[in-house]
Amino acid sequence: MKIIDWYILKRYLATFVALLLMFIPIGIIVNLSEKIDEIQENEVPLEEVLVFYGNFTIYFANLLFPIFLFLSIIWFTSKLANNTEIIAILSSGISFWRFLRPYFVGATLVCGIALIFTMYLVPNASEGFNEFKYKYFKKGRQSQETSNVYRQVNDNEFIFATNFQPNTRTARNFTLEHFEDEKMQFKISASRLKYNPEDSTYTLNNFEKRIINDREDEIYRASTLDTVLPFEFDELTPVEYIAETLDYGELKEFIATEKRRGSANISSYEIVAYKRWSVPISAFILTIIAVSVSAMKRRGGMGVNLAIGIVIAFGYIFLDKVFGTIAEKSTFSPIIAVWFSNVLFGILAIYLLIKAKR
């Protein structure tokens, strides 16, 4: 049986790698054909283009990784079924569960590689990929929140600005409120705030500080004041793709910090965190579905199996995107949104596996 295990495992992984090597260049060519005019117009240096498409390769492969795996198993297993090799293997006394072992070994290997990718390699690639996009392809579009920015910067202090400009490191109509035991102690306001990176200070124009007393408030004013404030300017409005650029440990810390600050984007950050686990796990679920769908010889052969597989794959992608969008735009639970597709297709996998075994 070890010979058969090795045969199935080699063919399984070889087909998966072949699909990756076939579709990734196609993805690069399609993207390059769409962006070539903008690349030439912006006179992007060749080395930056090469680095971008290196990052694009990792980013693109990670997005379609479960689908590549799914289709490769259907392709390879359908060929086994059409050549009656599966019937021959099962007729020799090997159980269907035993037949599945090399598939699970392959899924474990691919899942481990995917886990390393999603936790550590993809974040670095995502950072370069998105920075390049906003630098050359999305000129004029802000990658950060700029209007009515509200944050809790620590346990006692809250800030607000009606207009925030990351490029010039300035903010308009800035206020900082300090609380002790849920009671405001003082409030700082300024018509304009500017961050000075040389000495990490802030320049406040039309400065006013109001100290709250039981009888009469104390008010201090100045036309201009240079001072230190209890927050880092760049941390106030992180770029919208920040969660994709952090490894798992950094992402968990970032989410905890943003929760304290009252960020409105917590759901989207949590979706990214949960997907770091759900995407590799989907390798097992899609492996079971693919083997169950393609292990039986059907009229119409491999084409029918591939058609069924493509419908299932697009159904998986559709549900994943729909529930992810709902969670980002509403109060719907991010963990349910991310894991719903895996749970639903996991039930489908068990049903198809039992049916195929019969």
Image: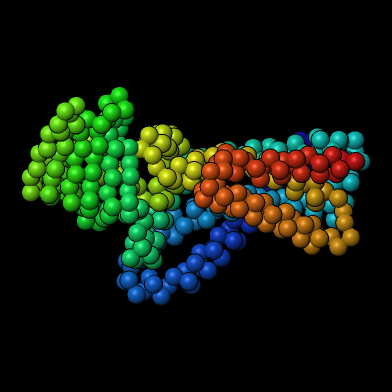
Q: Horizontal placement of 355 versus 157: left or right? A: right
Q: Quadrant of residue 136?
A: bottom left
Q: Position of residue 73 (x, y in %)?
A: 72, 50
Quarter holding the C terminus is: top right
Image mark count: 0
Q: Nearer the viewer, residue 43 or 85?
A: 43
Instruction: Report which quarter residue 250 is drawn in.
Output: top left
Q: Residue at x 90, y 35 (%)?
A: 93
User: Can you say which quadrant of the picture contains the N terminus?
Assistant: top right
Q: Residue at x 61, y 53 (%)?
A: 322
> From where the camera sits, is residue 72 visible?
no
Nearer-the-camera pick, 125 or 277: 277
Image coloring type: rainbow
| Residue 64 against residue 339 in the figure, above or below | below
Question: Residue 297: x percent and y percent?
Answer: 87, 53
- Identify which residue, 104 or 122, lies in the foreground: 122
Residue 180, visible in the rendered structure: yes
Q: Residue furthest front?
A: 215
Q: Position of residue 95 (x, y in %)?
A: 86, 35
Give the residue displayed 31% in from the left and 28% down from the top: 182
Q: Is residue 276 left or right of residue 255?
A: right
Residue 166 in the image, given as x and y percentages of width and height: 27, 53
